Image: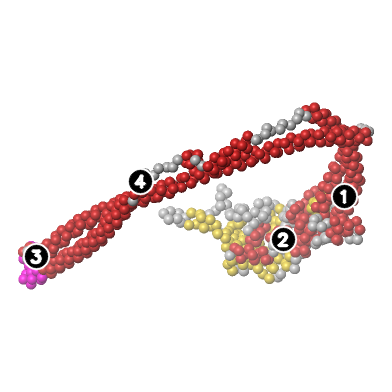
Amino acid sequence: MKTIRLKTLSMLNFKGIRRQEITFNTEGITTISGRNATGKSTVRDAFLWLMFDKNAAGEKDFGIKTNDTNGNPIPQLPHEVSATLLVDGQELRLRKCLTEKWVKKAGATEKTFSGNTTEYYINDVPKKAGEYNQYIANLCDETVFRTITNPAYLPSMNRDQLRPLLFQMAGEVTDADIAGNDRDLQGLLDLVTGKSIAELLEQTKAEKARIKNELDGLPARIDELQRTMPEPEDWDALASRKTRCEEQVEGIDRQLEDAAKAVEAANASRLKLVQAIADKKMERAKLESDIRAKAMTDYNIQSRKQQELKSRRDNLGYAIANHRNTLANIEADICLLQAETDRENDRLEELRKQWHDTNAETFTPNEHDLVCPTCGRPLDDEDAIAKLDEIKSRFNASKAARLSDNQKQGMAIKAKIQQTLDGITARNAEADRIKEEIARLAAEQQAIESDPLYAAAIDKPDTDRAVLESVEMDALNDEIRRMETSLPEAVRPADHTELKESRQRIVQQLQELRAALYKKQHIDHINARIDELTERQRELAQHLADRERVESWIDKFNKRKVELVEDKINALFALVKWKMYRPLINGGEEPVCIPMINGVDYRDANAAARMNAGLDIINAFCQHHGVYAPIFVDNAEGVNQLLPTASQMIRLVVTNEPQLTITY
């Protein structure tokens, strides 16, 4: 069990309080009184901001800073809250400082506000925000802390937030606990596999609606079948007439089939001879093709050889033309290289002349060089000799540099001339090789043109004459003419129109009889379907009864669950009783979470009752979570007697006192 008590609280420039330090009664009740707007609620906001960076309403963004008379924050004021806590009797000092950052930007004359910074201290040791917040969270969870320090906090929660907290306090109520030894409820639990009781109820309702929907439609379907049932007839007489008609149709079909077979046999012999004639004509076409191909064989061979000679001769001509083009390009390159060599030789000759001219230069002193540049008087002998030596040294150095540069340029030109001459030699060699190849190709071309076949005239043979002169072809034509002469006329089938019309009339009668007999099958089918639907009625009625029985079990289960859950939760409280479920008109239960005070809804009770109910809730939550913290009782002037608590209590009371007053 952890006990947290507030020993002292100091505020500096916090929400309008310029400086205030409060000492609290750690073993009893501390009353903070004063008229409205004197800072009573500010004390609670300061304590919660120190703990969680939020005010009593849970807001992070609220007005911490102290404002001037125009409602604007007073700049560059430090804002600080510090407190001394007793945690299980051990002192813990917490401090939080909010300061403004003012910076002077480049080129500006005044500092400007650039944001806030917050400093955190635990036992006077500076901490980072994350370290501070983690320490506070380890001390007490924020939600739990707000619950056990504000009597109105938990009753103001919505149902979905509050119910899980109460169920967690009461402990789990299992389905087995609810069922107990009740055989019906144990049977219900056997049906719950992979789903909750609520899901089973939804499933049962859906199945029940589906069953009722189908069951309600069955009588109409049975009545519809009975109304569509045909009237019975003399089925035996109809069957006998049907048999006679079928026999008559079979007799007519046999007659037509025999006549068709006779015509088919006669035409089969003729068809065989037609096929033989076609085979002979195909044989004749193949023979003609062979005769023509044989006559064209030698002609094709000679033509192909002549074409090959001409194609080879043309290819040689193309190759000779390409080589001549290449030779012309090489000769043009040689001319260009020779011209470049001549230009470089001219440059080299010019450099030689320049070298001789430079080398022939001698030092000749100038009388102006021996005059002082400042006063214009002639230099002394010693200075004149030094000056002449200096000028001569510069002259010799310049001459040597120019001769050296001349030699370097000459060496470069000689190397370039040699490179150009090497290129000319290589191109001359390539030109000689190409000339030899042109001569060889021209000789080969001349040899082809000398071949007698190259220019010979090849006559195409007369294949039609070869065909006409073929003895084998004459014999085959005679045989085909003989076979065509012996081909008989095709046999036409006899006229059986009357017989076919008689068959058509009998078939029409047969269809009518079959349609009449089909009514008997339709009646049998309808009767079988009525029997199926009647049996389905009995099955659905049983299924509906089974679902209704499951619904009654679930209703019984839910009522027992309501009783058990409410009993377990209410056992934790002395004054407040919780209504966790509310009955609905349809017999179900709606989940709610309503605190009741002596049978009255918390919202309808008076202020004193609500206050003591909140203290009762705090006592239960403190006991469950194992932690006690200071309780701030706002508007405490409206309560004559507060419910006793094990927690430190701080009453906030509205009086006519002009400033905050602390009493114990």
Mark 4 or mark 2, earlier in chain: 2
Q: Residue at x 62, y 67 (%)?
A: 122
Question: Dot 3 corresponds to which residue?
Answer: 361
User: Where the N terminus falls, by quadrant?
Assistant: bottom right
Q: Judging from the image, what secondary structure is the residue with disc 3 in?
A: loop
Q: Is residue 381 magenta?
A: yes
Q: x, y percentage for residue 143?
A: 70, 59
Q: x, y percentage for residue 53?
A: 63, 58
- Gap in angstroms between the C-alphas marked 4 and 1: 112 Å
- Gap in angstroms between the C-alphas marked 4 and 2: 121 Å
Mark 4 or mark 3, earlier in chain: 3
Q: Which amino acid does label 1 sit on?
A: Arg
Query: Which region shows up in magenta?
Result: 374-390
- Gap in angstroms between the C-alphas marked 3 and 1: 134 Å
- Gap in angstroms between the C-alphas marked 2 and 1: 45 Å
Residue 379: name its quadrant.
Answer: bottom left
In this view, the mark in front (4 or 3): 4
Question: Dot 2 corresponds to which residue?
Answer: 144
Residue 163: name its quadrant.
Answer: bottom right
Dot label at residue 456: 4
